[in-house]
Structure formats: C-alpha cells, structure tokens
C-alpha cells in the first residue's frame, strides 16, 4: 500500500514538473518578455537593465532552475497589467471556481444517484428509458452550447434565472447544471449498474424475505453497498470541474480562475496565464492523486495486492 | 457472426452517412459561400420567421454570412480534425503500444510511465498556454488533440499485445527465427486491428467536442473558418436577438457526436471479441468510462480495467 502511494505521489510530482517545463518552454518561445513589460519609448539601456533585473541574461538552464524554485516558493511575479503580485489575482478568483465546483458536484450527485437507482429498480420502464436518454445526451452535448441554450431558455425567453455573473444562489443554478450535466449522466449510469448488481444479490433477496419495507431495502441495504464506486467518483468529478472551469466560467461570465486565465490571454498578461494554469494543474493533479489514494483505500484488492 | 438487420445501428449509421456526404459535397450543397458575408443582409432570421427568406434558410450571422452554408462547411472541419488527429495519435500510440507490449521489461516500464504522465496532464490548460503564446491555427489544434489522444491508444494496444504474444503462433514464429519487427507487423498488428478500430471510433466524438471547445474558447480553429465551435461563440453576444447563430451549429455537433458515440458502442459490442467475452462486465466498465472511453483489453485484472476506465473519464473534460 505504501509503496503504491509513494509511486503515485512521485508520478504526480513528475507530471507537475512536465507541466511546468512545458509552460516554461512555451513562454520562452513566445518572444522577449522585456519588450512586453516595457513602454514603447524605452531605450536600449532600459531594456538591458530590465533584462538583467529579470535574470534573462543568464543561461537558459539557470533560468529554468530559478523559475522552478520560484514556483515552489509560490512567487509567480507581478501582473504585467496591474503590477500587483500574481498570487493576489489568483486568490481573488479561486473561491468562485471552488464554489462552482462544489455546487456542480452536489447537483450531479443529487440528480444522478436517485435517477440511477430508480432506473435500476424499474428496469425497462418509461422512467428507465428517459434516464438513459438523459445519460446518452449528456455524453454527446457540448457543454458550452448547453450553457448558451440554458441562458437562452431560462434567461432570455422565460426570464426566470440570471444569465451570468455571481450573486445569490440563483446565479449558481445554470452554471452548476452546465458543469454537472455530463457528470450527472456518468453518475446515473454508474449507480444504475451498481444497483442492478446489488439488487440481484442474495442479501437483498433475504432483506425482502424478512419483510422489510421496500424503501428500507433500497436505500439502506441497496444503496449503501452500491454507493462505494459513486463516492470515489464524486471526488474525481470535483477535480474534473476544475479543468472544465475555463469553459463554463466563460459562458456564464463567472468570475473564477478559468475566466481570469482567458481574460489574461486577451490582454497578453502572461505571468497570470502561467500562474493560473499552474495552479489549476496542481489542483487537478493533487485531486487525481487523492482519488487514487481513496480508491486504493476502499478497494481491498489494491490495499493488499501492493502492500 | 453477422448481426441481423434489425440489430444494425440504423440511426447513427444514417446520420454519419449524411455527415460524410455533406462534408464531401459541401461545395454543391451549400447555397452560399461559408465565409463571404453581405453586411446588408446581417442577422436575418430563419425562413419560418418573420423577415426570413429562402435565400438564407437558417438565417445569417452578424456579418451577413449564411448560417446553413457555414454549418454545412463546418462538418468538413470537424471530420478533418478528427481524422488527422486520430490518424496521427493512433499511429504513434499503436506503435508505442506494440513495442511496449512485445518488448516488455525495462522498455515497457519506461514507456508506460511516460504514458501515465501524458495521461495525467491537464491538456486543455496546456492548449490555452500554447495558443496564448502562438496564434490559433489548424495545426495547433491537431497537435493538441493528438497529444491528448496517443496515450489512450498506447495503453490499450499494449494490453492487447501482452495477450497476443503469449499465443502459440507467436512462439512458433520466434522459433522459426523471425525478427521482432516481422512478428509484430505480421502476427500482432493484424490481431489488434479490431481493437484499434473500436478505440478510434470511440474517440471521434470526443475529438469533435474537444475541437469545438477549443474553438469556442478562441484557442482552436481560427476565424473566419466555419468551425462549429467558432459559430457558437459568434452567436454568444446575440442570444437575445439572433439565437439561430448558436443553435444550429450546436445541433449539428450534438447529432454528430451522438451518432458517433452510438456507433462506437455498437462496434465495441460486435467487433471486439475481448469485450464480447467479458459479457456483463463490459457494461460495468463502460459505465466507469462513460465517454468514448477505452474498452478494456488488459485482461490483467478488473481493478486495472476499472482504474483505466475511471482514469479515462477523468481526462475527458
């Protein structure tokens, strides 16, 4: 188990290093950052001073080491546009992204688990068919388009929900659903198959023979055992949301980290783009590691096999 | 074992046939140019609405470009990106998978660690940086998509190879003194073909969604190309007044991806003998990896399979 975890952690660090390296290479390829930082009227002397100040006159490998070191101590430099530390910008936007991710996760579980469960119990019924259509569509629908159509219907035509921005809970409904639809479809299918397996088992038959109320059988005996994979899944989803944040936040003008990154691309504020991408990547990789740990913990086959 | 005709995937098949036909004959089918606009004819609604006319059956966008023609030409971009990206990633990934699986040992260990890392990268974010420092281009889109896809092929083909190389005919070829390259190309590769076909089909829908997402974010196919993602983004500012700009390319995308996914599912159920053997388990695995996911081939243990499924899902957004 410990060896397995150590291996996973090492791999995550390697992945992070790869991301950092790619970002480093790409930004160095993009031209001279000095020209970007300085005024148009700057003299050559000014350029020289700034180049030395930023350490850009040193050999590339040295620059790379300094770059990596700065990242690990959390120094991402200053925004080109506002001159404020990049970390401040990131901290301002991160809560909105996390909030949206949590609500979307809750929503996809609340939609996916009950639907999946009843879909399994009433196999072949109209409800089952509807649930499966819902799931298949969820896999094929482009999220950004779904978001726009939701805005069109609920925001423009019906006028019952705000079309964008962050505010009270009503602002959360559409973006959270957009972000969570695909995953709720996934949860639905996962719950459905897990429940189908559980419902066929002997202990469910026995619980029914004992004369327990059907709801007790389903929720207490059935769901409890069918839920294990779903729980693991939910964590995984949250991680996924961080990655999908860029799209949903753009559609709904949600002031999160993803949108900050895209805005900064338009204004060519590279330090923010870099830092934003690295922070989201780190969260993403850490989340994936957590899932592996959780999976290993919950699944005895791994817990013992790799001990 | 041929399927009976009622079991054939008529619905996805028809949509896909229509799509390919549209892409091939876009020049004859589209009533207008996809890129040339007429500024005097901007934001015309579809024909069934007031002010609509038959010249622009699905209306025009803010530059007066015909939405129907752009949607028709858009099918070309989606298909082209998927074909090239999957071709590149499939070739590279299959090659690595074959070598990794056949060689085993250190080569295998090394190649699979590289694959693991590649699988774990948040590539949408990397795509964003790539485009931030260069310019959006058709080539960049292909590059990013291919980067995202190759590990899936490598992993799957490696798993298949592991099983096939234990077979007697491979051992006999080794005894007969055939070279590794000969054995791989004559004995192993033909046997992984069905799996390769299934994985490729299952990826098409995913690639179309990914290209759409990148284009929508402005980091994909550059304007004024009639990419569906770009058209949807174009209509964003006109939702209240000209919803048709975003609606129709989105519908085209939805039906295309839906058809490809259904077709991929069908192919997996009917072509891949490994998965057919798995029987009931195949469904569980499919659930773990709901999107055009990798069918399970490793055969090593169900845990590997489930983890691979979960892993491929997590990579999907």
Image (tube, coloured by chain):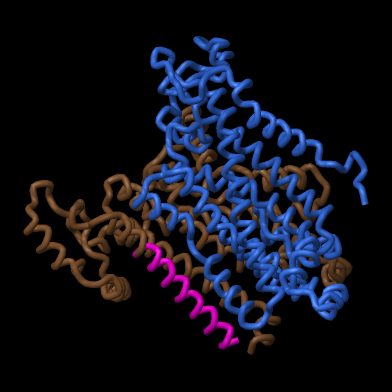
Camera-side residue of B302 and B150: B150
- Residue projecting furthest to the bottom: A307
In the depicted structure, whether residue A289 falls above or below residue B27 = below
Snapshot quadrant of residue B304: bottom right
**Residue A216 visible somewhere in the drawing:** no
Front in this rendered view, residue B190 or A148? B190
Residue B10 in the image: state x and y as whole percent: 81, 37
**Figure quadrant of the C terminus of chain B:** bottom right
User: Is residue A242 something one can see in this rendering?
Assistant: yes
Q: Residue at image x 73%, y 60%?
A: B295
**Residue under the point 64% across and 47% down:** B204
- Measuring from the top left, give residue A253's x and y in whole percent: 38, 43
Residue A22 falls inside the magenta stretch? yes
- Look at the picture and state if B200 lies above or below A147: below
**Closest to the observer, A246 or B137:** B137
| Magenta stretch encompasses residue A129 | no
What secondary structure characterizes most of the magenta part?
A: helix
> At which x and y percent is residue B190?
79, 61
Specify start and end residues of the magenta stretch as a single range.
A1-24
Give the chain letter for brown: A
Is residue A95 placed above or below B232 in the rendered structure?
below
Q: Tell me which residue sits at (54%, 78%) in the image.
A: A8
Q: Is residue A140 left or right of residue A86?
A: right
Report whether A249 appears left or right of B258.
Answer: left
Q: Colour of chain B?
A: blue
């Amino acid at each position: 188990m410990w060896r397995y975890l150590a291996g996973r952690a090492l791999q995550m660090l390697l992945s992070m290093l790869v991301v950092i390296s790619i970002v480093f290479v790409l930004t160095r390829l993009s031209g001279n950052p000095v020209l970007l930082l300085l005024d148009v009227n700057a003299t050559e002397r000014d350029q020289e001073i700034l180049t030395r100040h930023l350490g850009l006159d040193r050999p590339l490998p040295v620059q790379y080491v300094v770059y990596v070191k700065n990242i690990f101590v959390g120094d991402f430099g200053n925004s080109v546009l506002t001159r404020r530390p990049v970390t401040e910008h990131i901290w301002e936007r991160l809560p909105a992204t996390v909030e949206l991710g949590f609500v979307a996760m809750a929503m996809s579980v609340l939609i996916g688990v009950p639907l999946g469960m009843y879909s399994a119990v009433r196999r072949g019924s109209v409800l089952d068919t509807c649930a499966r259509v819902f799931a298949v569509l969820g896999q094929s629908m482009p999220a950004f388009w779904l978001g726009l159509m939701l805005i069109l219907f609920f925001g423009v035509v019906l006028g019952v929900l705000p079309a964008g921005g962050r505010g009270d809970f009503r602002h959360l409904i559409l973006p959270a659903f957009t972000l969570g639809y695909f995953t709720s479809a996934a949860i639905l299918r996962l719950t459905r198959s897990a429940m189908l397996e559980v419902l066929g088992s002997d202990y469910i038959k026995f619980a029914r023979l004992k004369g327990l109320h059907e709801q007790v059988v389903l929720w207490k005996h059935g769901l409890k055992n069918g839920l294990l994979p779903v729980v693991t899944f939910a964590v995984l989803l949250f991680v996924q949301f961080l990655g999908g944040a860029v799209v949903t936040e753009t559609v709904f003008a949600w002031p999160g980290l993803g949108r900050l990154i895209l805005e900064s691309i338009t204004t060519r504020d590279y330090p923010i783009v870099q830092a934003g991408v690295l922070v989201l990547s780190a969260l993403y990789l850490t989340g994936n590691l957590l899932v592996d740990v959780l999976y290993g913990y919950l699944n005895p086959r791994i817990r013992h096999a790799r001990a | 074992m041929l399927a009976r005709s009622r079991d054939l995937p008529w619905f996805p098949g028809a949509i896909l046939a229509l799509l390919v036909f549209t892409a091939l004959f876009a020049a004859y089918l589209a009533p207008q140019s996809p890129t040339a606009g007429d500024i005097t004819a901007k934001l015309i609604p579809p024909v069934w609405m007031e002010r609509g006319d038959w010249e622009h059956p699905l209306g025009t966008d803010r530059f007066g470009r015909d939405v129907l023609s752009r949607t028709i030409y858009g099918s070309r971009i989606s298909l082209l990106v998927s074909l090239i990206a999957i071709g590149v990633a499939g070739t590279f990934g299959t090659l690595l998978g074959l070598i990794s699986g056949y060689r085993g040992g250190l080569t295998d260990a090394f190649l699979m660690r590289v694959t693991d890392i590649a699988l774990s990268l948040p590539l949408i974010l990397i795509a964003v940086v790539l485009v931030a420092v260069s310019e959006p281009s058709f080539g960049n889109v292909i590059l990013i998509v291919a980067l995202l896809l190759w590990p899936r092929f490598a992993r799957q083909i490696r798993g298949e190879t592991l099983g096939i190389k234990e077979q007697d005919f491979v051992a006999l070829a080794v005894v007969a003194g055939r070279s590794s390259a000969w054995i791989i190309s004559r004995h192993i590769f033909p046997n992984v073909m069905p799996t390769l076909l299934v994985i490729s089909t299952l990826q098409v829908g995913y690639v179309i969604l990914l290209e759409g997402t990148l284009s929508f974010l402005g980091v994909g196919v550059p304007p004024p190309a009639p990419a569906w993602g770009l058209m949807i983004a174009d209509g964003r500012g006109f939702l209240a007044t000209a919803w048709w700009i975003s609606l129709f390319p989105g519908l085209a995308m939805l039906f295309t991806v839906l058809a490809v996914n259904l077709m991929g599912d069908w192919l997996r159920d009917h072509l891949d003998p490994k998965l057919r053997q798995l029987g009931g388990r195949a469904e569980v695995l499919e659930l773990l990896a709901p999107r055009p996911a990798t069918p399970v081939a490793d055969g090593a243990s169900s845990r590997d399979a489930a983890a691979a499924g979960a892993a491929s899902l997590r990579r999907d957004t």
